[in-house]
Amino acid sequence: MSGRARLAVCAFAATLMAAGALLPLVDPPNWLFQAGFLVAIQTGVGALARRVPLPRPLTVAVQTLVTLLLLTVVFARGQAFLGVLPGPDAFVHFGELLRAGADDVGKYAIPAPATDGIRLMVIGGVLVIGLAVDALAVTFRSAAPAGLPLLALYSVAAGLSGGEASWLWFLLAASGYLLLLLAEGRDRLSQWGRVFGGGAGTRNRSTGGFDPTEGRPQAPVRAGRRIGVLALGVALVVPAALPALDGGLIGGVGNGPGGGPGGGGGTISAVNPLVSLQDNLNQPQNREVLRYRSNAPDNQDMYLRILSLDRFDGTSWRSSQRKVTGVPERLPEPVGLSPSVQVTEVRTNLSAAGSYKQDWLPMPYPATAVAIDGRWRYEPAGRTLVGDRGQTTAGTQYSVNSLIVKPTQEQLADAPAPPAALLQEYTRVPDALPGDVRRTAATVTRGAANDYERAEKLEEWFADTGGFTYNTDVRSGTGVTAISRFLKQKEGFCVHFSFSMAAMARTLGIPARVAVGFQPGTTQSDGTVSVGLRDAHAWPELYFEGVGWTRFEPTPSRGFRPEYTQEQTPSGGASDPARPEEGSSAAPEQSNRPEDDACPRQERQLGECGAADPRDVQPPTADDSSLGTVLLVTSGVVGGLLLLAVPLLWRLVTRSRRLGVPVRRPAEGEARSPGGSPAPGSPGASAASLDADGGAVAGRTAVDDPGRTLAAWQEVTDSAWDVGILPDESLTPRKAAARIVRLGKLEDEPAAAVHRVARSVEQVLYAPVPRAGTGLADDARQIQAGLIRAVGFRTRMRALLLPRSSVRVVWALSERWSAFTDRWNVRRLRLDRWTAFLRRRPTRQRG
């Protein structure tokens, strides 16, 4: 094995050893085998490119292209052209996966499930690190800097694991780096011997770069070992300096700097049902995150819903990846809601605290209209709004029109079967769901006559009769194992209750999902309602045809049981929804009231404590952000198309100049040179030249026949070049014409046209008195058409869109650049001489 091949293998091994530090973060760990296989292909491509050999930057570019193709095959095959070539749809899919992965790493505790988004992030990250290590250590032959990406990979993994990284991963990463350094040192010594060192000694390759006569490592190895020791020291210090990230994979939700128990401040994000919801419920200080004012008759139905979790894959409940659109002026009618069901439209003005930074917008459900400034997008299936390009809820004021849906028990009991597509999507449960969950659901709902009665029995069993206890200190979990454990231990908080009821409802054939958001909050003396961290909540939504998605409340001692699950269903109205009344909200039980002293002094000085007084926000007149996005994307597409069309446009312009040049007939008696051009000093002499592209120079006072003939011949040569017939400057025009006819498979008129143009060129170049050629432009066009007809579709498209002869542009620019540098060097030489002359003048004066 050659030294460079050995170095490539060591770079591959070092990358995988460092990637092992990511194993504790994601479960199951089989993603590492896939990443190793892709890195091996990437390394092999680099080895082949270096063996060709390609220039170093081109080698890295080829590896980068292959890496993109590999990621496309693995993650975006369905959106790629022929399953391999990434197009616009593939890049859009990559963006969606990365956004989903970013959401996932903020949701899940360590170890996080290997979702598609997380797999793309970790496998893509390992490939990027592998490419950097291979490029630095092998392509550019500098192994010491290659330790930086390896160090970054290990340090990030160790920091994210909260200091719980095993020493095994550190030793593996360190060993991989040292192995890479020693391989480079051995490779250098095998080529150059002792570059630095003392006395002579015999080089012994078996000792890995050590001189046996001196008993000490040679200088390159010593330098590598020093760098390795320094890098390993940094690897020990950096993870210790990185803060342990509580809860989520890359951020503890609900805890910013000092935001843990007993702390306060930082960014609040109260969406995560796995970690942040439990953290927020256990906060010692109930900080305010939202404040609202509504014209609803009471608050008990004013649950502020953030998003719905509708996918249950056995490891967790999560939100499906769905497309978003611009926010319409009026949201579509809620799915499944019948006109026979009583609804009341209310208007709510909301204000978010400056410290509450959330991508999803809390709103009453179902919203019918939203007035808000900023970059927000609408997700139709969940009827939610999500921030675009970094938009968050921090300090946002907005108004929401929503419906209070009040179905009767009879309407719910008589609900017809839901649509088949909706039933199939929202009753899906994983195969790993334990059988005791299904059996318990069937036992609890025994005797129920319809889905509504089954849902009501489940809610009552969880909230009242099942012997469950509300406890926020119980270990969180949403997978099948956690649900089974919760049903046995009967102790948990809203996450356990809502997720378990939704899973059990699905086993009974009832479409179900889980909503995450806030309870109605606490009414204040000024008529506003304050929502704090401890109001974070999760509840199940079950679907009934004619009513739509319907809220249930299985969590004991939390929230409000809906009226349609109680004995009576009183009716109620609302005032004008256009303007909420002051103090129109009924005061619920005064619990979980945000504390006035819960805000740290720093945030109090910045004005980020609590939310501002809600105000009425009018709908925007136009979606400026959508228009700007459309214009930006359109400009990018147009610019890209223009860039791709540059060779085509240059070729068309050049052909037009060559074949459409006006001709001045030589005056009688005008002197000509033996080559056919005007004699020096004659009036037409200055017009007998060609431009850098081989075309006759236009815009001058005269253009002669020789110039036109040579331009036509140049066009014939370039047309043949475009279809793959390389020009041969060593051939005479007659032999070149025969070659074009033979290789281009020309027959009849196109073949005769080639010979006519060649004879005209011979007349111009060699005849004592050249005869003017006629119809040369038509002949050139006929030849070009014949060459195009004789080739296949791909060659034809290549000749049209990316003609080979367009390289003449690069040649022309290179010649002009060379001329410019020559002129600049002459001027610089003159300047240097003048400067030297001025410097010698004082010496001459003293003499």
Image (spheres, rainbow, N blue to C red):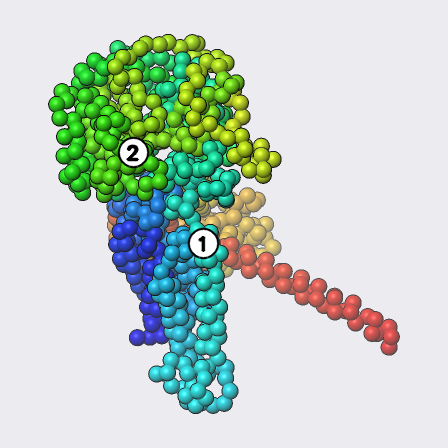
Relative to residue 557, is residue 649 depicted above or below? Answer: below
Give the amino acid at mark 1: Arg
Q: Nearer the viewer, residue 734 or 540?
A: 540
- Looking at the rendered structure, the secondary structure element under dot 2 is strand
| Circle number at residue 53 | none
Give the distance between the C-alpha atoms of the residues marked 1 and 2, in whole angstroms.
Answer: 81 Å
Image-quadrant location for residue 464: top left
Residue type at mark 2 is Thr
Residue at 35% x, 40% y: name it: 473
Q: At x 13% / y 20%, what residue is drawn? A: 449
Would residue 692 appear left or right of 18 to someone viewing this image? right
Let me know if residue 660 appears in the view: no
| Residue at 21 percent of width and 13 percent of height | 410
User: Viewer-proximal residue, 271 or 494?
Assistant: 494
Q: Residues within 10 Å of mark 2 (few under 14, many from 20)?
A: some
Please state which of residues 293 and 661 is positioned toward the viewer in this rendering.
293
**Residue 437, position in %: x, y?**
18, 36
The picture places residue 656, in percent across and down from the top left corner, at 44, 43
Q: Which residue is mark 1?
A: 808
Say which residue label 2 marks. 469
Q: Earlier in the sequence, mark 1 or mark 2?
A: 2
Q: Residue at x 20, y 29 (%)?
A: 505
Q: Is residue 164 left or right of residue 443?
A: right
Q: Quadrant of residue 301?
A: top left
- Camera-nearest residue between 489 and 37: 489
> Given the current orientation, which residue lies at the most extreme right position?
846
Whether residue 578 sits left or right of residue 567 in the image: it is right
Q: Is residue 612 visible?
A: yes
**Residue 333 location in percent, x, y?**
32, 18
Secondary structure under tag 1 reads: helix
